[in-house]
Image (cartoon, helix red, strand yellow):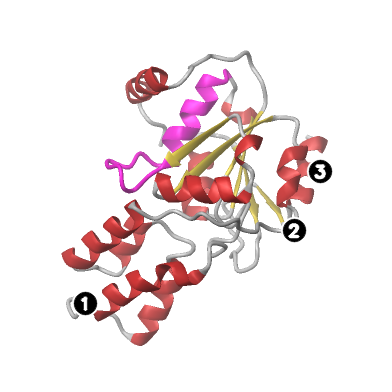
Amino acid sequence: MQVALSEIETFMCDYGAHHSLVIYPYMPLIIFDFDNCLAPGNSVGEDILLPLFDVIESDKSNDLTPSMRQEMRLDFWRKPLDYIVEKYKFSEHSKSASYAYFSQLSIAHPIEGYEDTHLVNAFEEVKLLVTSGFQKFQHSKIRQLGVEGAFEDIYYDDPGNPPRKGKAFYFDIIAKKYNTAPSEVWVIGDSEESEISAGNSLGMKTVQILRPGVKKSPKAQFHVSSLQEFLSLVQMS
């Protein structure tokens, strides 16, 4: 569902107070996701979350079976924290500990993307990045991957800054800021529930990139297995 214009105007006024806000002439756009699109979710190294897992799994108020614990650990590399907290019914202690842990988390070492991540620079269209996650952590990953300069702007759908607006909110802002019809906006990412759903709700062209472990979604309009395939798709359109 498209966000009310009044909400968008409020956000853009606030955004403009901290950034140089310019309304651009019409131009085609590409909105990229980050995790499991440009870099694997666990590219930072899985050990980084072990202290948090110890807290959650030792909390006797959490009713987690061994199989649930294993699934939960996987979800931390592919789902946002608020989704995980709700799915596994974390106790207040585990919820607070999780939010506190992620709010201070960042990385200071380079991370590796996919073999084709460098192709993000080959797209001539205006490129934006919209990522879900705690801003400090996400920004450090983007910086350490070395792709920050590829994007005109970066937006963070941060669960640590409630109320969380959702990606459709930011997609709508982007289309209006760049004076581009939704039908001329490409959205690429891995998640059916996140960017694919958000793009579809606004009438944008949605592309699911089928990175290893990503389940193919019938809701995406297009499917690609690499950025090279996506580049060809955009050039042919």
Q: Is residue 197 visible?
A: no
Give the mark, 3 or 1, whose residue is nearer the N terminus: 1
Q: Where residue 4 sits: x, y (%)?
A: 35, 26
Q: Where residue 224 sits: x, y (%)?
A: 72, 54
Question: What residue is disc 2 on?
Answer: 115
As rendered, which of 4 and 19 lies closer to the eye?
19
Question: What residue is disc 3 on?
Answer: 232
The picture quadrant where one finds residue 6 is top left
Give the mark, 2 or 1, whose residue is nearer the N terminus: 1
Point out the residue furthest to the front here. Answer: 108
When the figure is inspected, residue 91 is found, relative to residue 158, above or below; the finding is below
Q: State the separation of the CA atoms marked 3 and 1.
A: 49 Å
What amino acid is labelled 3 in the image? Ser
| Residue positioned 42% across, 80% down in the render | 70
Q: Is residue 190 visible?
A: yes
Q: Residues within 10 Å of mark 1 (few under 14, many from 20)?
A: some
User: Is residue 164 part of the magenta span, yes or no?
Assistant: yes
Question: What residue is disc 1 on?
Answer: 59
What amino acid is labelled 2 in the image? Glu
User: Is residue 189 part of the magenta span, yes or no?
Assistant: no
As rendered, which of 191 and 85 lies closer to the eye?
85
Give the mark, 3 or 2, whose residue is nearer the N terminus: 2
Tell which tag, 3 or 2, sits nearer the viewer.
2
| Residue positioned 78% across, 50% down in the render | 229
- Badge 3 vs badge 1, beta-carbon distance below 8 Å: no
Is the N terminus in the top left, top right, bottom left or bottom right quadrant? top left
Question: Magenta region: which residues?
Answer: 157-179
